[in-house]
């Protein structure tokens, strides 16, 4: 079922690339339209899965990734429509397409562990997925900032320079994405801690719940992520770490998020693996 | 009706002659009015910019129009024809239309793709239009040329990239700061390029422009020109601390801004907002070590010059695509014009049919008199519709004929078959079809 949105995302990705290279307004509009269709198809898929399991489908890694991709494309579309800046699509869509392949190849089965049946759990996961989507945007914006910064600093005003947005735009968008992400990350982590405390009472024997501690890699990485972005926020305010440093931090932060999200999720962690 | 063009441009005439043939100094409006009194100039538009003086005329008799236009130029500018005849270019019909399209597209400009010329052509037409000198043919041609200019600009990159140092500097500032509103500008030393750059920045809505110079009078003069504020030379460090964009153009032999200056200006704190320095002076005013500060972007005059050259070469790469659009539009225009060639015959045919219809209704009037008024009106309506439907297909076919020769043959045949004399009704025919105006606006 996840294949249909993937196809649209892939075609939209090609359109964004063509638009980036040739800068034809018509191609740009087509790219946005294709992305929108992809998002609608994806919304339908997630809606169907929600009806099937009676809650938003993210209690297994593949479905969580699918939901994450959906949130990311939505956030990107919001960014594009509010700034009228399409150049970022060519960087965002490869991430979207790459991640969406995972749920297509490995649909996964929604788990029905009763311990997860709590509103707190859903707030926890939804907040974190949205935070990660924001960080993905911020990371890409940061990388783009560094590219554009290098071009202007080195007086190399060529292909990329003409196509990428201004430094100021990238910096402001990056700041907003980090701020929104940090807010949701904080909410997600706090709610997660509260939920884990409740779950310990309800299901003290569950090995997952027992593994919920700071020495668990996934939880450790979540706190590390929170620390990095908190530092990014404080440094920007008090130490003038905007521009290139902020861009670096958001790229590093997103690398940690990806690491936490993909390999750790599948292979390392002992908590967060409900069946 | 024929289109006739006569003029000089930077391609055909030296600047001295172009100055002598310039219309704008005495007002294009007067020139176009004076021209319209000439009998062969049924419609006329005068385009006069610093690089060209061109006269467009719609005339029944191009040969006579040529002689009259040469005489007009000679009299209006009080110049012997021999002085400008060798530099004059003359174009007729499609060639004249094609020329106007190329001019509007910026393809005939000294700096290819420059945007001002389209505005100048629009203004020239507007002037002629207000004085009732431009009629339906020139109206169509000029409005078409505006659309061509717009199409070339949106579909090709011919107008992209700054092609002067001052514009390149402003374009760079926009890639750093995005919107320039509220940005603080510091100009150190006055010169031509720094004045131009400051003016461009002003038109982009920058916050305040502070000017300082070793000779305070110079700073004050520039401040007046760009609506800025002149400050004494000693206050430069303070102005530097709050500036986002700095333009330097002093005659100093040694750098006047160094890394230490900037670092002490920001009070030893890290710069969180970018500083864009444009060093136009030779020898340079700004030491190159300032770029070691992360948020400082330094461009000197050579850097900007190479940006300009790159942009120029990128523009010329777009020329062939732009020419293709012009050729394409010229073809469309020609086919439109051919369809117009059939108009007199079409109008005459309609008039003839309608006359027959009215005559028959008249003849039957006494028989129809017994009908109630609504029924009479219905009869009138039905007969009118029948005539319209009968004529619909032949009219469309006639307008869509592929070339002029076929069209002449067909219109001849129709004229003869129906005993039409469209030429006599030509004046009415022109009036019957309302001139299409402002389709681009």
Image: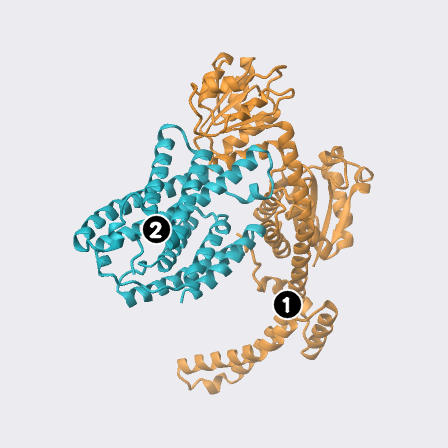
Viewer-proximal residue among A154 and B151: A154
Viewer-proximal residue among B44 and A39: A39
Q: Would you place residue B292 above or below residue A34 in this image? A: above
Which residue is depicted at the point 59% across and 19% down?
B285
SS of the residue at dot 1? Answer: helix
* Residue A81 position within the rendered picture, expressed as x and y whole percent measured from the top left: 42, 50
Query: Closer to us: mark 1 or mark 2?
Result: 2
Q: Is B51 on the left-hand or right-hand side of B275?
A: right
**What is the display colour for chain A?**
cyan
Residue B422 figure quarter:
bottom right
For the image, the number of numbered tags is 2
Q: Would you place residue B229 above or below residue B374 in this image? A: above
Chain assignment, label 1 = B
* Residue A52 position within the rendered picture, expressed as x and y whole percent measured from the top left: 29, 68
SS of the residue at dot 2? Answer: loop
Which residue is depicted at the point 75% across and 51% down?
B91
Chain assignment, label 2 = A
Which residue is depicted at the point 63% across and 37% down?
B163
Q: Which chain is orange?
A: B
Residue B189 figure quarter:
top right
Task: From the image, tell me which residue sits under label 1.
Answer: B343
Q: Is B223 on the left-hand or right-hand side of B309?
A: left
Q: Would you place residue B31 above or below residue B236 in this image? A: below
* Disc 1 from disc 2: Cα separation: 82 Å
Q: Is B404 on the left-hand or right-hand side of B180?
A: right
Q: Would you place residue B258 above or below residue A20 in this image? A: above
Density class for disc 2 (Cα within 10 Å; few <14, some 14-19, many ≥20) is some
Task: From the image, tell me which residue sits under label 2.
Answer: A269
């Amino acid at each position: 079922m996840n294949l249909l949105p993937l196809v649209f995302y892939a075609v939209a990705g090609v359109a964004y690339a063509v638009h980036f290279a040739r800068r034809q307004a018509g191609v740009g509009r087509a790219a946005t339209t294709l992305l929108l269709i992809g998002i609608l198809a994806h919304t339908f898929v997630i809606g169907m899965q929600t009806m099937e399991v009676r809650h938003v489908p993210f209690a297994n890694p593949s479905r969580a990734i699918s939901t994450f991709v959906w949130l990311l494309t939505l956030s990107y579309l919001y960014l594009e429509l509010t700034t009228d800046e399409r150049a970022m699509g060519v960087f965002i869509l490869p991430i979207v397409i790459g991640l969406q392949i995972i749920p297509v190849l490995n649909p996964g089965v929604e788990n029905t562990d009763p311990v997860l049946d709590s509103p707190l759990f859903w707030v926890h996961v939804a907040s974190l997925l949205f935070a990660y989507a924001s960080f993905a945007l911020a990371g890409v914006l940061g990388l783009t900032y560094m590219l554009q910064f290098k071009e202007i600093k080195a007086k190399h005003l060529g292909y990329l320079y003409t196509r990428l947005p201004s430094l100021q735009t990238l910096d402001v968008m990056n700041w907003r994405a980090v701020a929104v992400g940090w807010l949701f990350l904080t909410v997600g982590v706090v709610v997660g801690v509260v939920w884990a405390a409740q779950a310990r009472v309800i299901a003290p024997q569950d090995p997952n719940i027992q593994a919920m501690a700071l020495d668990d890699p996934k939880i450790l990485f979540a706190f590390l992520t929170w620390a990095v972005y908190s530092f990014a926020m404080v440094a920007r305010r008090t130490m003038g770490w905007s521009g290139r440093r902020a861009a670096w931090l958001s790229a590093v932060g997103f690398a940690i998020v990806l690491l936490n999200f993909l390999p750790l999720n599948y292979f390392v962690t002992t908590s967060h693996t409900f069946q | 009706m024929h289109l006739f063009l006569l003029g000089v441009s930077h391609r055909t005439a030296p600047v001295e002659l172009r100055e002598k043939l310039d219309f704008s100094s005495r007002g294009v409006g007067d020139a176009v009015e004076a021209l319209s009194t000439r009998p062969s100039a049924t419609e006329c538009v005068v385009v006069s910019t610093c690089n060209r003086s061109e006269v467009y005329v719609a005339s029944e008799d191009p040969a006579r129009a040529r002689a009259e236009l040469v005489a007009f130029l000679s009299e209006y500018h009080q110049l012997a024809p021999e002085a400008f005849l060798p530099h004059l270019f003359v174009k007729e019909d499609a060639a004249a239309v094609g020329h106007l399209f190329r001019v509007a597209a910026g393809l005939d400009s000294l700096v290819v793709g420059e945007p001002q010329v389209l505005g100048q052509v629009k203004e020239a037409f507007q002037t002629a239009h207000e004085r009732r000198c431009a009629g339906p043919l020139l109206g169509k041609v000029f409005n078409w040329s505006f659309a061509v200019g717009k199409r070339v600009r949106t579909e090709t990159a011919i107008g992209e990239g700054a092609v002067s140092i001052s514009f390149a500097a402003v374009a760079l500032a926009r890639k750093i700061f995005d919107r320039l509103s509220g940005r603080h500008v510091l100009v150190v030393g006055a010169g031509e390029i720094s004045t131009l750059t400051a003016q461009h920045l002003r038109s982009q809505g920058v916050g305040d422009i502070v000017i300082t110079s070793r000779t305070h009078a110079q700073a004050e003069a520039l401040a007046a020109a760009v609506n800025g504020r002149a400050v004494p030379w000693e206050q430069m460090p303070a102005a530097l601390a709050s500036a986002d964009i700095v333009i330097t153009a002093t005659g100093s032999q040694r750098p006047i801004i160094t890394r230490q200056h900037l670092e002490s200006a920001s009070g030893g704190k890290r710069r969180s907002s970018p500083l864009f320095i444009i060093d136009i002076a030779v020898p340079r005013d700004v030491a190159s070590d300032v770029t070691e500060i992360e948020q400082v972007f330094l461009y000197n005059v050579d850097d900007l010059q190479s940006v300009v050259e790159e942009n120029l070469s990128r523009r010329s790469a777009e020329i062939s695509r732009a020419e293709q659009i012009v050729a394409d539009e010229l073809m469309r225009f020609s086919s439109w014009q051919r369809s117009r060639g059939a108009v007199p015959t079409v109008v005459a045919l309609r008039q003839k049919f309608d006359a027959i219809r009215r005559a028959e209704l008249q003849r039957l009037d006494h028989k129809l008199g017994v009908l109630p008024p609504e029924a009479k009106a219905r009869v009138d309506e039905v007969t009118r519709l029948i005539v319209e439907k009968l004529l619909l297909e032949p009219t469309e076919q006639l307008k869509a004929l592929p070339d002029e020769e076929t069209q002449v043959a067909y219109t001849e045949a129709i004229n003869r078959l129906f005993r039409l004399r469209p030429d006599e009704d030509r004046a009415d025919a022109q009036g019957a079809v309302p001139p299409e105006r402002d389709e681009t606006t």
